[in-house]
């Protein structure tokens, strides 16, 4: 299938999100694709609150069947979560399970005032009552296929669709 | 023969010894531990990873630090922890080790943390339990103490970043030390070019150089230019035995004083697995001095044990 240009979607997402954030908004990207995206948006908006990053490996609901992710990186939330307006950023919204895990982790840092969700692509097929407030594009992707963001050495984004998961990868988020 | 700690797919099933573990498994544990450090600095110092799992601390030998840090690690992973002080329970009534384990498995144990004075005790339990039950060796006889070896390497990596150019000295009673053996295996697997053991002939095992270390009997020669000095505990019972003239004599030759430490690199770190005998293997001014990372070792130990438990439970 033809995939849209991730750079164009990123501009679209930035345009929609811009009016929703202020200097006190905490942008939090989910590793790996969401963290790249959040980094880009944080730089473009020039936000005063430092950028946060979540690695949700310790909060996944498939730990019993899939085990611990091979490359866990520390989560970093360098601002006070209590009462904060937080925008969680991810590359692809699918079942909603990753976002649930991210929200659970955020609450272990404190009690946020408001959490919103910004995603590059919403591919539908939700398994949890979760919705994004800011979306780059909606895209129907055949079930079982893995859609994710890639970043080249120049920092340019593209979308990748793979048929089968790599053997060590976890089920799609 | 397949390593009994690994599954057919190569995943870590039990942690019994560092000897024979591939480098990428050690690195995975250390990297995962780094992520758990952040968790322990948050408002809620817990993650839900091992929710609903039961972990039994089986200590057949006394321990405060190791047992407590295992307990804290399990609790921070949201597991239920049951501490059994076997020294004063069933085994004194004559129950065998495996009968004790079978009974605990009947109580739906998911993981055992085992300390025993007999080398191979954890191995025996691991070969006995059902495939979904995991075993961690928390020290068996003179054989191994793998999580201590891992927390020591974590500490070294934290302060020195990379093992590729390091000179590391392990000083004292290497003969009776499972800590030293586990650390040596970890360091050589991680590619440390210069590992030295320093001690009197009576306290170094014969053939220790076959583990890939150099042997020194003189502190001044052994400490020269070191990046890391790991002091071992001189166990009280050894001080009275035939292996040593006296604790004072030992301190004179092998106790770490500021004068001897000055022979190491200016930014050298000093480590000790605890409990310390001040004035026997280490001078108080060194133990409490700016080079000492003895207390950070304890803190890192919790994150390292969280990493080991979560990797095992996920395999």
Image (cartoon, rainbow, N blue to C red):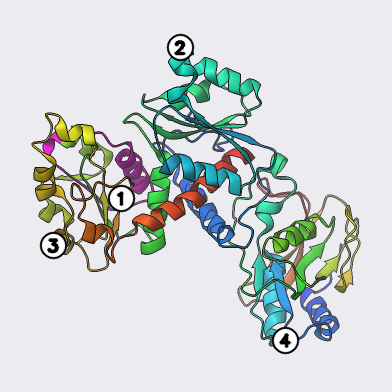
**Label 4 sits on residue:** A23
Specify whether disc 2 shares its chain with disc 4.
no
Between marks 2 and 1 in the image, the one whose residue lies nearer the viewer:
2
Between marks 3 and 2 in the image, the one whose residue lies nearer the viewer:
2
Residue B206 lies in the magenta-colored region: no
**Label 3 sits on residue:** B259
Other residues around mark 1 within 10 Å, as few (<14) / some (14–19) / many (≥20): many
- Tags 2 and 4 in contact by the CB under 8 Å rule? no
- The chain letter for the residue carrying disc 3 is B
- Tags 1 and 4 in contact by the CB under 8 Å rule? no
Specify whether disc 3 shares its chain with disc 2.
yes
Query: Residue A45: x percent and y percent?
Result: 72, 86
**Label 1 sits on residue:** B272
Mark 2 to mark 4 CA distance (whole Å): 68 Å
Query: Residue B245: x percent and y percent?
Result: 8, 36
Which comes sooner in the sequence, label 3 or label 2? 2
- The chain letter for the residue carrying disc 1 is B
User: Which numbered disc covers residue B94?
Assistant: 2
How many numbered marks does the figure carry?
4
**Is B20 in front, or is B39?**
B39
Q: What element carries label 3?
A: helix
Which comes sooner in the sequence, label 2 or label 1? 2
Mark 1 to mark 4 CA distance (whole Å): 47 Å
In the image, residue B118 above or below residue A115? above
Q: Which residue is drawn at 82% across and 76% down?
A: A9
Q: Is mark 1 on a helix, strand or loop?
A: loop
Mark 2 to mark 1 CA distance (whole Å): 36 Å
């Amino acid at each position: 299938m033809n995939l849209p240009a991730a750079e164009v979607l990123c501009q679209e997402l930035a345009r929609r999100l811009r009016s929703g954030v202020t200097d006190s908004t905490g942008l939090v990207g989910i590793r790996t694709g969401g963290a790249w995206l959040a980094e880009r948006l944080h730089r473009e908006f020039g936000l005063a609150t430092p950028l946060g990053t979540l690695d949700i490996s310790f909060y996944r609901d498939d730990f019993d069947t899939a085990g611990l992710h091979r490359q866990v990186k520390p989560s970093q939330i360098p601002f006070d979560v209590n009462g904060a307006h937080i925008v969680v950023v991810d590359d692809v919204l699918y079942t909603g399970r990753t976002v649930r895990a991210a929200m659970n982790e955020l609450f272990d840092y404190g009690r946020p005032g408001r959490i919103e969700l910004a995603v590059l692509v919403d591919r539908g097929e939700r398994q949890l009552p979760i919705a994004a407030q800011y979306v780059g594009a909606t895209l129907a992707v055949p079930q079982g296929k893995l859609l994710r963001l890639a970043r080249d050495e120049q920092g340019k984004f593209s979308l990748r669709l793979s048929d089968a998961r790599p053997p060590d990868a976890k089920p799609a988020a | 023969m397949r390593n009994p700690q690994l599954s057919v797919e190569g995943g870590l099933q039990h942690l019994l010894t560092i000897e024979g573990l591939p480098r990428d498994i050690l690195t995975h544990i250390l990297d995962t531990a780094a992520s758990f450090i952040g968790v322990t600095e948050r408002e809620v110092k817990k993650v839900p990873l091992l929710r609903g799992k039961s972990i039994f601390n089986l200590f057949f030998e006394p321990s405060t630090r190791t047992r407590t840090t295992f307990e804290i690690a399990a609790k921070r992973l949201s597991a239920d922890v049951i501490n059994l002080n076997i020294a004063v329970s069933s085994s004194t009534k004559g129950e065998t080790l495996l009968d004790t384990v079978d009974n605990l498995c009947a109580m739906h144990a998911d993981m055992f943390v085992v300390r025993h004075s007999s080398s191979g005790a954890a191995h025996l339990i691991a070969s006995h339990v059902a495939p979904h039950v995991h075993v961690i060796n928390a020290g068996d006889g003179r054989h191994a103490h793998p999580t201590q070896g891992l927390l020591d390497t974590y500490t070294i990596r934290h302060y020195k970043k990379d093992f590729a150019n390091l000179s590391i000295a392990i000083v004292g009673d290497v003969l009776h030390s499972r800590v030293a053996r586990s650390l040596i295996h970890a360091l050589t697997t991680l590619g440390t070019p210069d590992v030295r053991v320093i001690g009197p002939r009576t306290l170094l095992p014969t053939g220790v150089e076959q583990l890939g270390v150099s042997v020194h009997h003189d502190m001044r020669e052994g400490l020269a230019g070191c990046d890391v000095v790991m002091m071992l505990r001189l166990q009280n019972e050894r001080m009275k035995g035939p292996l040593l003239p006296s604790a004072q004599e030992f301190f004179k030759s092998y106790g770490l004083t500021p004068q001897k430490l000055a022979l190491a690199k200016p930014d050298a770190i000093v480590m000790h697995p605890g409990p310390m005998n001040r004035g026997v293997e280490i001078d108080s001014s060194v133990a409490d001095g700016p080079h000492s990372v003895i207390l950070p070792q304890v803190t890192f130990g919790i994150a390292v044990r969280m990493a080991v438990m979560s990797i095992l439970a996920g395999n």
